[in-house]
Structures are given as structure tokens and as C-alpha cells.
Image: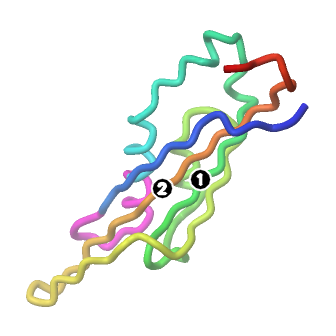
Amino acid sequence: MPQKRIILEMGSGNDLYGEDYTKAAKRAVHDALHHSSIILFRSLDLDRESMVVKVAIGVQKPDLVDCDAVAAELPHGKVTVVAEEGGLNVVDKENGTVSVIATAGISAYLDLPDGKYTV
């Protein structure tokens, strides 16, 4: 069966004082998830754990994101997280702080037979 993307959600999150890229990434994932009410699993009697979930996190310092910790925030499916350069750092030179803004794009895929589910 061909894999079809069934969900695409975006979100943003931040860490204002700790310069914690993982915290900002988790908050971006939560923001994206709170934009969704995914009833198709129940409505179509589909197994949500069979869903493949791909998460892209954009931050200025991707190597500082704990991708496993971010993946643990997703409640269902087989999750992979990739951190890449993006997002935004807002530097406050007067106070010596950096506010981290992360973006998240979450795509979910299911194996669906051609022609069975149509819109």
C-alpha cells in the first residue's frame, strides 16, 4: 500500500531566558499538536500507532536539540525528529540574554490503499 501524508501541522515555541533549544523545540511541537483534532483514526477505524510521524525542527543551533526528547512528546506513531538550521535567536545585548525561537513541522503518514479513501 502506498504511504499517504494525512497530516501537516506547524508550530512555534520559545525559551526566553535559558537558551534551551530542546525546550523551545518541545514547545513548538506542543503548539503544532494543539492545532489538531485528528478524529479520522476513530472515524475510519485506523490504528494510530501504525502512523509514521516525521518532525522537522528549525533552530539556530540544531546540534543542541535532543531529538529523542522531542520525539517523546509525540503521543502516537513511529516518530523521527530531525533538527536543522532555522528558527530565530533574539539577542538582548543589554541584559546578556538570548531568546530562542524554534519552529516545528509535523507530517504524519499512513499506508492507505489506493481508491479506498477518497475525498
Residue density around tag 2, few if under 14, some if 14–19, many if 20 or more, within 10 Å: many
Task: Indicate whether residue 18 is drawn in magenta.
Answer: yes
Q: Is residue 84 left or right of residue 19?
A: right
Q: Cβ–Cβ below 8 Å for labels 1 and 2?
A: yes
- Residue 7 pos. (x, y %): 59, 37
Check disc 1 and report its element: helix, strand or loop. Answer: strand
- Residue 103 pos. (x, y %): 43, 60
Q: Earlier in the sequence, mark 1 or mark 2?
A: 1
Query: Which disc is residue 11 wearing?
Result: none
23 relative to 63, above or below: above
What quarter of the picture does the C terminus occupy? top right
Write the start and end of the magenta stretch as one range: 15-27
In-front residue for pair 71/35: 35
In-front residue for pair 30/17: 30
Name the residue beneath numbered marker 2: 104
103 relative to 54, above or below: below
Name the residue beneath numbered marker 1: 55
Q: In this view, does 95 lie to the left or right of 90?
A: left
Residue in the image at 27% along x and 70% along y: 18
- Residue 71 pos. (x, y %): 58, 49
Q: In this view, does 87 lie to the left or right of 54?
A: left
Disc 1 marks a residue whose amino acid type is Val
Disc 2 marks a residue whose amino acid type is Ala
Count of marks, rendered view: 2
